[in-house]
Image (tube, rainbow, N blue to C red):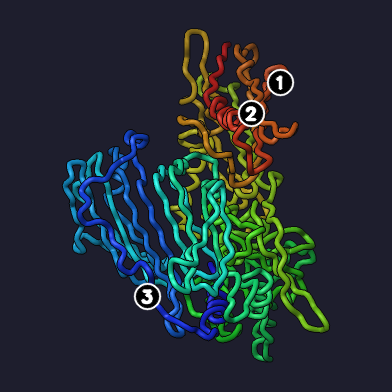
Amino acid sequence: MKINYIKSIITLVTILSTSLLFSQDYSFKNYDWNEKETKVEVPEKYKNEKEVILSRISKIEIVVKGKTAKQYHLLHEKIFINSDDAIERNNKIYIPFNLNESVLVNKARVILKNGTVINLDQKDIKEDVDQERGMKYNYFAVNGLEKGAVIEKMYVLEESPEFTGQTIKMQDEYPIANLNFELIYPNYLIFKTKSYNGLSEPVIDEKNIENTKVLSITEKDIPALDNNENYSNWAVQLKQFRYKLDENQLSGGRNLNGFKEFASNIYEKLNPVFDKKQQKSIDDFCATIPKSEDLQAQIWNIENKIKKTITYNKYIDTKASITDIIDSKQANQSDILKIYLAVFKEFKIENNMVFTSNRYKIPFDKDFESYENLNELLFYFPSINKYLTPTEIEYRIPLFPVTIANNYGLFVKEKTFTGVKMGIGEVNFIEIPGNDISHDIMNITVDFTKDFENPLITSNLTFGGYSGLNFQPFKDFVSAEQYKTFLKNVAENYTVEADFKSLTTENDGTDFIGKKPFILNVTYDGKDLTKKAGENYLFSIGETIGKQMEFYQENKRTLPVEIDYPHYYTRNIKILLPKGATIKNLDKFVMDYKTQINGKTEAAFISKYTKKGDEIMVENKEFYNIINYPLNKFDEYKAVINAAADFNKIVIIVTK
């Protein structure tokens, strides 16, 4: 959700308003692969790999022609295919580009192990269009792939320049034998750059092309970084390169694309002065919002009203006025922000606009001011230290998408200087609501007193915070029959697959999101969990807590652990026995696994039991207090995760 108008402003200021002294074609216009090459040498160290990027050449060139700035992007790759999985993965060669971009060169071929070359013709190109994301995908349908083959592909795109910030990934989930990247641009422009995770610093050449600088990075033997490790953040660990335009020596512009400029522009854009008609529209709209003395409840009411009456669509045109937004009941990104800001002002609610990024895609770097960091939106309320997401319909304060938490953001707040209001930007950390909110509680009773072979099981399941958010919205968006099926599936996942004697819920629907936990109450017979073994009965009591993930890590772990959000589980299991009955293996309930960091327990699974007469109470607690766990604590963390799966397998021996 980029603020595209800001990007346009900066482009105009930094390029088109200058006195342009020359124009040129892009320097790699005649670049091509070697048509005569019928054999690609694979280095010895890679001959047993399943897939290898033998060569990746990427060039991005900014070219000025008259009063127009264009960007040309070349990608040329050779990929060694050496497994059935690699063949399946590469039988389509995708060339993604925006709908407003154009492809100047688009070619691919396959070089087989015996030297045969299969040239993929333009007729082999298929096209997919993703209207929702505004993306068009061209792909070659590849036939004839075999182990030992090399796929070679090349494309050149003409596109709008990326001045406000761009990240280039220099590492992949497969090894890269040779990598070369070039950023080519007029010599009066100065770019700010940063290399991450051990990537080498760029080298700048000002002599090779007249009036032009060539910034280049060359790397060899970049190791693969597994993108399939559970509980990790691949995007943070990659070797990558970031750049943005920082100075234009022709226009005299300095510190371009910075947060100070962004904050000032965005505040002015989204806080217009309203005429009487527009102010009346706001007053009338606010009059329909329930009032509350509690600030968080009041913000909840505002959010609920806007999300239930105004449809957000990022692709529609901006409305001429706030009256048009309210009347049409439709809003794009800037429109929806205007509505929230106007209503907060009416209710005198102090707030900050927060611009940030998805931590799993482009993590926010507080030390590198780039508009690429400003793709996601929040509101922050300082007096209650809570956040609201203005565009995600299923969320309500204090819950917001976990992908943009545990991350830095640009907080834009209103300040008044000499009677003039303006937007001031400040980078702060975005905390996620803690495990006190996302707390799941299971109260389970297993009653053997009426029927030893078919105990009655009662489960009261409470899902707080983000866990409850997984279930609460469904009721408002599906039919009654679909919701009934949905609830049965949820119950089976958190208990067992059974014919439930009763299944009821509390606090379902969007009216309870962020206010109360979702509650599921079920009762069912336990005959399918019971087996007779001589004089004893074997009862699979662990299954009453529902399915649990078992965490396997077949290869050596390479990435530290990063989870979505802190959370806490409390499970209480009461076992009622008839007079004289006993359980032989109660020691199975005693478990203690912990992950300690800096002397503090940050994750744990602890289980114990107490016995009082014919009643046994089993209690276990599982919690994850923090989001990031270092790589050297992975085995301890995995043990905590797997403890719940081990508990799920517990079978008690009950005897009369």
Residue type, mark 1 in image = Thr
Residue 468 or residue 436, whichever sits in front: 436
Percent across and percent down for residue 248 are 58, 76
Q: Residue at x 66, y 74 (%)?
A: 261
C-alpha span from label 3 to label 1? 80 Å
Do we see residue 329 in this rendering? Answer: no
Residue type, mark 3 in image = Asp
Percent across and percent down for residue 210 are 44, 73
Circle 2 is placed at which residue position? 573
User: How many C-alpha atoms fall within 10 Å of the one at disc 2: few (<14), some, or many (≥20)?
Assistant: many
User: How many C-alpha atoms fall within 10 Å of the one at disc 3: few (<14), some, or many (≥20)?
Assistant: few
Say whether disc 3 or disc 1 marks the residue closer to the N-terminus: 3
Image marks 3 and 2: residues in contact by CB distance under 8 Å: no
What SS does tag 3 mark? loop
Residue 25 is labelled as 3
Residue 175 or residue 551, whichever sits in front: 175
Percent across and percent down for residue 341 are 68, 74
Residue type, mark 2 in image = Ile
Q: Residue at x 67, y 59 (%)?
A: 397
Percent across and percent down for residue 450 are 58, 23
Extreme residue in the bottom direction:
276
Circle 1 is placed at which residue position? 610
